[in-house]
Image: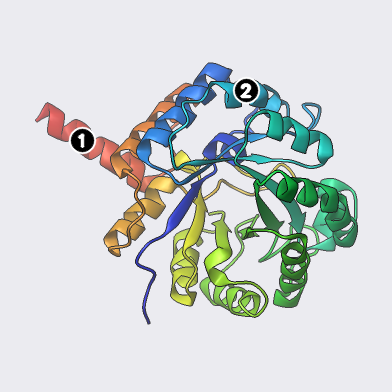
């Protein structure tokens, strides 16, 4: 078994991490977070979402945020778009990549975006064509790929079916997302092995939540199949508003600690990420959910005071 020598980490904290917070976060705080993450060296930061503020009020400042960030050369700044209105806003905001989203579960698709999987793909056809016409990267995200809060089990075949549909739209990258964190290493490997028959694994990403404490184990399982792109959220921010009880995304600091220990290159400065995690957690008024982040921060404090 050989693991990838290099991994691309997609930092999703500013969008997926913060969108569910009940308290309104000032755009200045979001901006400081994105700029800190940029300085840490991420190749890709999911910074904004151009959805209706009625549905996701926290993302209402996306245009202002995208206009103000200190863009790091080489970093792709992504925005989630649900339709052409969102796409046009993302284009005007100079997003480098637009993200479309579907689900591997029919029940979740109906609850989340009020349509079937097939209908959701049709809705994105115009967005996909516009992204290609404007030479923007197009990423597809598949929710509930390892389990659904409404229907329970989701078969690998259901995931592969949506991968096929997103591939045919022209997606440059496709995320396999464990939205409610029920996946286990064996299932992760089965899903990615099936997906590899339809789409290159080097263009697939693992997006894991840590509800059952399996996210790090699931990342290792995916690494063993050849996956080399992963999503993570600084300080373990985030959840899913449509998945009751789902805890946050896997913490970026914990993923970096794993990858550093495996000798896998990311180009990301773990100490800068720890600082960013402590910064946003302090603003939110609660401890970081990252075990590695808190341990590193405590060790550094001890070293400074000893």
* Location of residue 54 in the rendering, given as x and y in whole percent from the top left corner: 81, 27
* Location of residue 283 in the rendering, given as x and y in whole percent from the top left corner: 47, 22
- Visual colour scheme: rainbow
Q: Residue at x 66, y 48 (%)?
A: 245
Residues marked 2 and 1 touching at CB (< 8 Å): no
Q: Which residue is mark 2?
A: 23
Looking at the image, can residue 244 be seen?
Answer: no
**Foreground: 208 or 48?**
48
* Location of residue 183 in the rendering, given as x and y in whole percent from the top left corner: 59, 66
Q: Residue at x 25, y 36 (%)?
A: 298
Kindly state the secondary structure of the residue where label 1 is placed: helix
Kindly state the secondary structure of the residue where label 2 is placed: loop
**Foreground: 49 or 110?**
49
Identify the image quadrant of residue 53. Answer: top right
Q: Is residue 86 left or right of residue 215?
A: right
Q: Which residue is mark 1?
A: 300
Q: Which mark is residue 17?
A: none
What quarter of the picture does the N terminus occupy? bottom left
Looking at the image, can residue 81 be seen?
Answer: yes
**Foreground: 127 or 245?**
127
Identify the image quadrant of residue 62. Answer: top right
Q: Residue at x 52, y 72 (%)?
A: 185
From what the image shows, is residue 142 above or below residue 271? below
Q: Is residue 136 left or right of residue 205?
A: right
The total number of labels drawn is 2
From what the image shows, is residue 214 above or below residue 43? below
How many other residues sit within 10 Å of disc 2, few (<14), some (14-19) or many (≥20)?
A: few
* Location of residue 306 in the rendering, given as x and y in whole percent from the top left corner: 9, 30
How many other residues sit within 10 Å of disc 1, few (<14), some (14-19) or many (≥20)?
A: few
Mark 2 vs mark 1, CA separation in Å = 30 Å
From what the image shows, is residue 304 above or below residue 232? above
**Foreground: 268 or 96?**
96
């Amino acid at each position: 078994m050989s693991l990838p020598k290099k991994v691309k980490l997609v930092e999703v904290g500013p969008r997926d991490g913060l969108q569910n917070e009940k308290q309104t976060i000032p755009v200045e705080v979001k901006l400081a977070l994105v700029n800190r993450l940029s300085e840490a060296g991420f190749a890709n930061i999911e910074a904004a979402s151009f959805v209706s503020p009625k549905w996701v009020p926290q993302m209402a400042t996306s245009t202002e945020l995208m206009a103000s960030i200190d863009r790091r050369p080489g970093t792709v700044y992504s925005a989630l778009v649900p339709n052409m209105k969102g796409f046009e806003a993302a284009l005007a905001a100079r997003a480098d990549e637009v993200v479309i989203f579907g689900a591997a579960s029919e029940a979740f698709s109906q609850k989340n975006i009020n349509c079937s999987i097939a209908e959701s793909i049709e809705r994105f056809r115009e967005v996909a064509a516009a992204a290609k016409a404007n030479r923007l990267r197009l990423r597809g995200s598949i929710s509930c790929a390892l389990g659904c809060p409404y229907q329970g089990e989701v078969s690998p075949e259901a995931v592969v079916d949506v991968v096929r549909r997103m591939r045919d739209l022209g997606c440059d990258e496709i995320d396999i997302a464990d939205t409610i964190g029920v996946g286990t290493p064996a299932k992760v490997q089965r899903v990615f092995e099936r997906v590899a028959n339809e789409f290159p694994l080097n263009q697939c990403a693992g997006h894991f939540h840590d509800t059952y404490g399996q996210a790090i184990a699931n990342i290792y399982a995916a690494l063993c199949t050849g996956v080399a792109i992963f999503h993570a959220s600084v300080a373990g921010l985030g959840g899913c508003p449509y998945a009751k009880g789902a805890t946050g995304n896997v913490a970026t600091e914990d993923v970096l600690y794993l990858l550093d220990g495996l000798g896998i290159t990311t180009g990301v400065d773990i100490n800068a990420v720890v600082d960013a995690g402590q910064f946003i957690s302090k603003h939110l008024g609660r401890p970081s959910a990252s075990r590695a982040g808190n341990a590193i921060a405590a060790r550094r404090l001890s070293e400074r005071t000893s």
